[in-house]
Amino acid sequence: MNKQRANIVQHPGPGRPKGSVNRTTAALKEAMLEAFDRGGGVDWLLALMQSEPKTFASLLARLIPTESKTEITHEGLTDEERRARVAAILDAGRNRGA
């Protein structure tokens, strides 16, 4: 058994860098995009929206980020300036969906 343990690497390499995409995942995404293009693309999605609205909504929900991190620096600003900045951010968010 000691001979078998001698062949085991004690300290494996660092592996894939954080955030990098697995080759298989990248290949599958590329294939899915090609299938989407060949299968009608936007026209197919529009037909799906009409015929299967629940499925369409489920796909759409997967594209929306589940959380958002916003940081506002307010050093040296008056309360009025802070309120104006927050209002501008909220307005931009509302207009983005329109």
Image: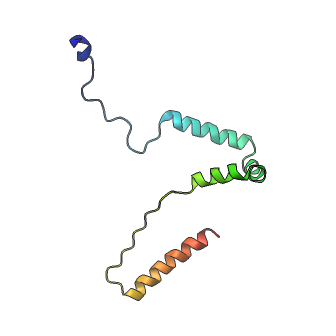
Please, which colouring scheme is shown? rainbow
Q: Is residue 56 above or below residue 69?
A: above
The quarter holding residue 12 reads: top left
Residue 84, horizontal then vertical, whole percent = 46, 84
Along the horizontal axis of the image, is 29 left or right of 4?
right
Above or below, 76 against 48 in this view is below
Measuring from the top left, give residue 91's x and y in whole percent.
55, 77
In the rendered view, does 45 fall on the left or right side of 95? right
**Residue at figure coordinates x 27%, y 23% from the top left:** 9
Instruction: Work out which quarter of the rendered image holds the C terminus and state it.
Output: bottom right
Q: How many marks?
A: 0
Which residue is more in the foreground, 66 or 82?
Answer: 66
Q: Residue furthest front?
A: 54
Residue drawn at (35%, 35%), measured in percent from left and top? 15
Where, by quadrant of the figure, is residue 8 drawn?
Answer: top left
In the rendered image, the vertical position of residue 3 relative to residue 63, given as above or below: above
Horizontal placement of 57 versus 64: left or right? right
Q: Look at 35% across and 84% down and name the residue there.
A: 77
Q: Nearer the viewer, residue 57 or 3?
A: 57
Coordinates of residue 62 in the picture (x, y in percent): 58, 51
14, above or below 62, in the image: above
Q: Foreground: 46 or 22?
A: 46
- The answer to whether residue 32 is left or right of residue 74 is right
